[in-house]
Amino acid sequence: MGANGSHANGTLESELGRKWETTGSVGDIQIVQKKNKKDSVKLPEESHTPNRIYAVFNKDGKDVKAIAKYGPDGKKEWEIHTTDHENLGPHYHPWKDGKPIHYINDKGEVKNVAYNLDAYKQSLLDKVRNYEP
């Protein structure tokens, strides 16, 4: 995001991109949150600033909700989730062309591909979890 929160398609007129504000940073990771505290907790789909990493905390502020890495085109490359679905614990979802990569399970359900955190992603999560505003 640029200073005004605009997103990667280059326009400054995006209402979507103006919904976030930066509240702090941990090294090169920017901590963001929605300006409207009643909105759902999630990260922007795109970043106006290439090669950015954003993190967002749960509404209660007690833990990290998600961390995402955006590529040179401003689109997500991957997103870490701390919510434990399907007994993965903290995990990440790869993205391609601005969308999470999917697969169809044996029940015919569409699911997001998910992997355990590698050492680099775990270190990012640890850094953000140790953040104190």
Image (spheres, rainbow, N blue to C red):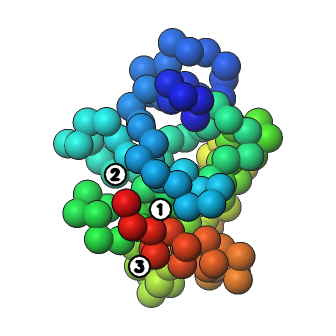
List the residue tagged with mark 3. Answer: 84
Name the kind of residue labelled 1 in the image: Ala
The x and y percentages for residue 24 are 46, 51
- Residue 50, image x, y percentages: 73, 39
Q: Name the element at disc 2.
A: loop
Question: Which amino acid type is shown beneath numbered disc 2?
Answer: Val
Please give the residue where the numbered disc 1 appears in the rendered image: 66
Q: Residue at x 60, y 64 (%)?
A: 93
For residue 41, the mark is 2
Q: CA distance from mark 2 to mark 3?
A: 16 Å
In the image, farthest residue toward the top: 13
Residue placed furthest toward the bottom:
87
Horizontal relation, residue 63 to residue 68: left or right = left
Q: Nearer the viewer, residue 24 or 41?
A: 24
Residue depicted at x 65% and y 55%: 28
Q: In front of the other: label 2 or label 3?
A: 2
Looking at marks 2 and 1 on the same chain, the residue that comes earlier in the sequence is marked by 2
| Marks 3,1: beta carbons within 8 A | no
Separation of marks 2 and 1 at Cα, in angstroms: 9 Å
Residue at (50% x, 41% y) in the render: 44
| Element on which disc 3 rests | loop
Disc 2 and disc 1 in contact, CB within 8 angstroms: yes
Mark 3 nearby-residue class (10 Å; few <14, some 14–19, many ≥20): few
Relative height, residue 62 to residue 31 (above, below): below
Q: How many labels were placed on the picture?
A: 3
Residue type at mark 3? Answer: Asp
The image quadrant that residue 68 belongs to is: bottom right
